């Protein structure tokens, strides 16, 4: 694991490896994780997500996958 500090909630920001294989990259490439471009400018992750989207892997096989950062936002109620 290669750590890159902590986020505002004190969670460790890291790249996870199994031997020399980058698990973060593998998860994104297989469509099991999002590349969060707001906080990451990693070109390899961006390319891996584009490839996963193109080939409709993992979550990209869903009709309308919901990004986790949108899932956490409070839902505004429509006024009647």
Image (cartoon, helix red, strand yellow):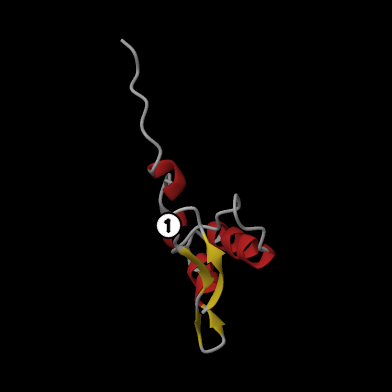
Looking at the picture, how far across and down is residue 31, in whole percent? Answer: 47, 63
Looking at the picture, how far across and down is residue 35, in whole percent? Answer: 55, 58
Q: Nearer the viewer, residue 4 or 47?
A: 4
Q: Quadrant of residue 64?
A: top left
Pointer 1: residues within 10 angstroms few (<14), some, or many (20+)?
some
Position above or below: 51 against 80: below
Q: Nearer the viewer, residue 51 or 34?
A: 34
Looking at the picture, how far across and down is residue 55, in whole percent? Answer: 54, 62
Residue shown at the point (37%, 26%) measured from the top left: 76
Q: State left or right for residue 44 relative to residue 68.
A: right
Residue shown at the point (60%, 65%) measured from the top left: 48
Q: Is residue 67 visible?
A: no
Q: Is residue 76 visible?
A: yes
Residue shown at the point (44%, 42%) measured from the top left: 70
Q: Quadrant of residue 79?
A: top left
Q: State left or right for residue 20 relative to residue 74.
A: right
Residue shown at the point (35%, 18%) measured from the top left: 78
Q: Quadrant of residue 72?
A: top left
Looking at the picture, how far across and down is residue 57, in whole percent? Answer: 47, 63
The residue tagged 1 is 59
Location of the C terminus (image quadrant): top left
Position above or below: 7 against 64: below
What is the total number of numbered labels drawn onto the structure image?
1
Instruction: Return the residue found at the far top.
Output: 80
Instruction: Return the residue found at the far bottom.
Output: 19
Instruction: Return the residue found at the far left.
Output: 80
Label 1 SS? helix
């Amino acid at each position: 694991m290669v750590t890159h500090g902590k986020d505002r909630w004190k969670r460790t920001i890291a790249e996870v490896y199994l031997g020399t294989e980058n698990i973060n990259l593998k998860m994104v490439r297989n469509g099991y994780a999002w590349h969060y471009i707001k906080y990451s400018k990693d070109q390899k992750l961006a390319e891996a997500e584009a490839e996963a989207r193109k080939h409709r892997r993992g979550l990209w096989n869903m009709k309308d996958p919901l990004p986790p950062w949108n899932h956490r936002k409070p839902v505004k109620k429509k006024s009647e």
